[in-house]
Image: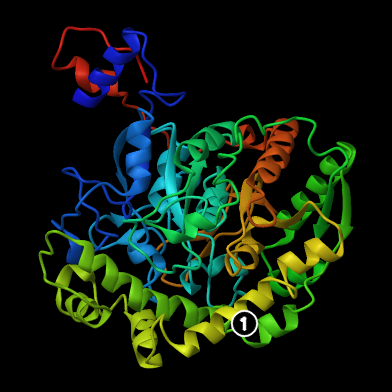
Amino acid sequence: MAIAKELDMERAQGKSRGPLHGVPILIKNNIATDDKMNNTAGSFALLGAKVPRDSTIAANLRKAGVIILGKANLSQWANFRSNHTSNGWSAYGGQCKGAYFPDQDPSGSSSGPGVSSSIGLALAALGSEVRSPSMDTLNSEQTLTAAQTDGSILSPSEVNNLVGIKPTVGLTSRYLVIPISATQDTVGPMARSVKDAAYLLQTIAGPDPKDNYTLASPFLKSGQPDYVGACNFSSLGGSRFGVPRNAIELFMSDTSGPVLQAFESSLDVIRKAGGTVVDANFTALEAFSNSADVCLLPNNETNVLGSEFITGIAEYFAELTYNPNNITSLTELRTFTEQFPAEDFPQRDVAIWTDALKAGFDATSIQHYEAVQADKYLGGPGGLLGALSRNNLDAMLLPTQFAPSFAAIVGAPGVSVPMGFYPPDQPIMMNSFGNLVATGPNIPFGLSFLGRRWSETSLISYAYAFEQRTMVRNKVQPYLVPNTELADVLSKNSTKPYARL
């Protein structure tokens, strides 16, 4: 409240730090802040740890006058610990659930940011993306989809009826964001409208000497594009979009019917707005699927993520000014997790870490280099980037539940926008852990626009034009909404009236 009061006084004196001055935002509990808030990735291993300074993301928010309202729960370690767990669960934060159906799977790993933004606990939230739900999202009899391996912004945005922007790797800093992958990690906004998400992206985007990936930005001399100004109702007209039908065929399942019906209707909306839609398959999709592991994550991507996590988490531990459990490596972190009762081992295993350690190499190895090169082919000439180039396209279109991996493996951007909802009579299907509803009545799903690296302005413009023509978000309301305002709490201790948030 002291921070809010200070910002209100600045505004009263005619000073504004920007369009988000005094606006409350929630951030994922892996984005470090140099204050009293913990940064734990949902683990007791980091409870009480101290960082030397704010993460660059947090510093950018404060500079813009944003109120960092708190840290939102996540799938522990950004869903990079266990093959047998539930989305939205962390040892420190407990189980997060979605608001559109009782016991709804909130997806992940940015589960808390997704749910909190969806019901208005803040204007918007920040998530981070590499790994989304693994096989825990679905019943064991279901086909696993691409969204179950990547999509930690796109996937929870989809099921929480939000707009999610997964930026190009390097558009936003990852300094002092608890890492998984240097080549795939990225931080982005999750909001109830495209324009709100664009405002937040405008605030956090930019170069950072502490993250060399941001120094590859083409905007170093020209400055960041105007992401808010990109919200153009007419942008679909004259644009070319591709649909990789072979990817849809690979990942569709028994529950895909309502999603595919809404997807075809969405293509009609784009055509009526003047856009051209053509089929544009991913030529290396067979190689992608043949090399996949049990979670449909290509083995080379598994190697990339595992080896980079070994290196990255050790570097993060080394940055801490206070390390309460003196953990310095993934091996020591695994030992702590197996021995600390609240971490719920062995019910929730540490298989992902064990597999990474068994592989026996980190991000400095030749094996890592070779895996990255394989990803560049599967997502480049044989995947997203190749399809865009061969067909002279402005963006690719996919249901969000099929989309994230194709952008993730080459660090390309994506924007998910609400597309529809499962019908009221949709059969309930539980996740494989048995505690959450993975598919059920009124659960939202989204449409993703995927593009070339650094093409956020175009993707935002298309998403905005689609959103404004359909306004899908408003068609179904969450069954669970907050019924206590901040003003109600404050008024119990003060006679001074407060504006309702």
Q: In the image, what residue type sits under mark 1? A: Ala
Q: Is residue 252 left or right of residue 101?
A: right
Q: Which residue is mark 1?
A: 374
Which one is nearer the viewer's eye here, 11 or 120? 11
**Residue drawn at the location 54% of the way across and 68% of the way down:** 148
Q: Is residue 43 left or right of residue 452?
A: left
**300 vs 407: above or below:** below
Which one is nearer the viewer's eye here, 254 or 275? 275
**218 vs 19: above or below:** below
Asked whether residue 479 appears in the rendered view, the answer is no
**30 vs 288: above or below:** above
- Secondary structure of the residue carrying tag 1 is helix
Q: Quadrant of the N terminus?
A: top left
**Residue drawn at the location 37% of the way across and 21% of the way down:** 501
Specify how the rendered protein is coloured: rainbow
Would you call the spot at circle 1 few (<14 residues within 10 Å), some (14-19), or many (20 or more)? some
Image coordinates for residue 303, horizontal then vertical, percent: 48, 83
| Quarter assignment of residue 194 | top right
Image coordinates for residue 125, horizontal then vertical, percent: 42, 41
| Quarter assignment of residue 429 | bottom right
Q: Is residue 316 left or right of residue 388?
A: left
Asked whether residue 406 appears in the rendered view, the answer is yes
| Quarter assignment of residue 403 | bottom right
Which one is nearer the viewer's eye here, 111 or 231? 231
